[in-house]
Each structure stands twice: as structure tokens, then as C-alpha cells.
Image (cartoon, helix red, strand yellow):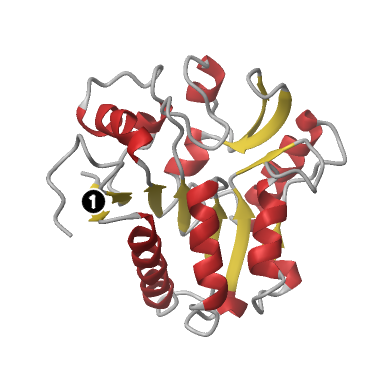
Amino acid sequence: MPKLHIYKNERETCYAFAEWLADLVKETLTRQGSFTIALSGGDTPKLVYKILATDYATKIDWDKIHLFWGDESFISSTDEKNNPALVLKMLIDTLPVPKNHVHGIRTDISPEASALKYEDLLKTYFNNGNTTFDLVILGMGEKGNLLSLYPFSQESHHHSGWVMPVYDKQDDLYKVTLTITAINASAVKAFLITGKKKEDVVQQVLKGKYEPEKSPAQLIVAANKPVHWFLDEGSAGKLIKPTH
């Protein structure tokens, strides 16, 4: 079952997420020597990353954190939509994360070659195992899409590998993204969603008819692994009565 965390507004939601993340890292590091995170882009994660880079700069053992990207767009590094560039600016340049703990997706080669390189990197890092990250941070679009996995894309839904190239018709650009397989192989998954414009899709994904071809986010199943949903009252408006 999804675990819901509902807060009054975006700011409260993001601060709660940062605190939850810090606790998860601390608890996990009692059992192992490092903590791996696959990062998501989007407006809401930007605020979380800013909070982590300021209020949590000394509350997390950053030298034991390994950062990976959930997806990457093949556009200029100065473009607003280039998620890793924003993350690097907010996190890597501010926090004491070792440079060799930052694992990016290459954009200086073709999307197909980049996807293969990134999958090789992940398979090497995770020893070709059946598990991937300690945490995958996910946003969700108004159509139920996540990372660069879009509705009515058979390949996105059924790709058995960990990484794949995709062509985004709406933005007219190529992207490389983690697959559903890679996401579901992570230990913990956390959606971070705010804003009233997301209330319909949140209700559909969590309480509506199971139509994963329409809403790929429904494919992120529990599978005996936690799936957390951090929502504000706007995005949870049609879901349940707020408890925070």
C-alpha cells in the first residue's frame, strides 16, 4: 500500500520530505556504507534540493551519498529544463559530495549510446544485481507520466533493461531515462507532488481504475517495497481528507 504524507502547502511538504530523507539516510547508513539516490527534476524537487543544500548541509553525511539522475534531456546545459545542471548548481557545488560520487548521463554522444553507457555504469555499480537505488525521488506530470516515461508508450511500460532512450514529441527532443524496471528495483520510492493542478491525476493514479498504459505512475507498485507519496493539500484535494 502507498504511504501518504499530506501537508498544508508546498513549503511544508518539501521541508517534511527533507526531514524524512535525512532520517532515511541516517537509518540506512547504520546497515551499509553508502546511500544511493536517483534524482528527479521538476519545480517541486528544486525547492527540496535548495532546502537540502542549506538547512540540511550539516545534517546528512554527504560524503557517503552517491547521486544518480532519473533522466536527462539532450539540450544545452544552460537550458532551464536541463535538470542535472540545476541539481549540480544547487547540491554538488554547495555540499561536500565527492565528485566521484556524482554519476551523470552523458549528452555528448547519441541518446542510444548514452543509454547503453549509463546502463553499464548502473550494472557495474550495483554488481548486476536485482536491486538498484536506496531511494528514487519521483515527480509526476499531469498525464500520469514520470521521469521521461509517457502514457501510451509500450516500450516505456515493458522495457526490461534499466535505461532507455526516448523521443519526447511534445518538447521535440531526445531524452535518456530510467525504466520502470530500474525504478521498481529500488529499495524505496518517493513521489513528491504539489499543486491543485495535479489533484485529478493523483486521484486517478492512487484511487482510480488501473490503467497503466494511460498513467505510467501506476506501474510503480509496492512489490513489498515502500512507495511514499508526499503531497500538499492542493494535489491531494480529491484523494482523502488532509491529516496534517
Q: Is residue 193 above or below residue 144?
A: below
Q: For residue 131, say whether it is visible.
A: no
The answer to which quarter of the image holds residue 100 is bottom right
Q: Residue at x 56, y 19 (%)?
A: 155
In percent of width and height, residue 174 lies at 73, 27
At horizontal 34% and vertical 59% (from top left) the residue drawn is: 13
Q: Position of residue 190 (x, y in %)?
A: 39, 51
The disc labelled 1 sits on which kind of residue? Lys
**Most foreground residue, 244 or 152:** 244
Above or below 162: residue 102: below
Residue 124 position, x and y percent, is 67, 53
Instruction: Residue 126: name its quadrant.
Output: bottom right
Q: Is residue 226 above or below residue 157?
A: below
Residue hosting label 1: 3
Q: Residue at x 43, y 25 (%)?
A: 143
Q: Position of residue 54 (x, y in %)?
A: 55, 76
- Whether residue 177 is visible: yes
| Location of residue 9 (image quadrant) | bottom left
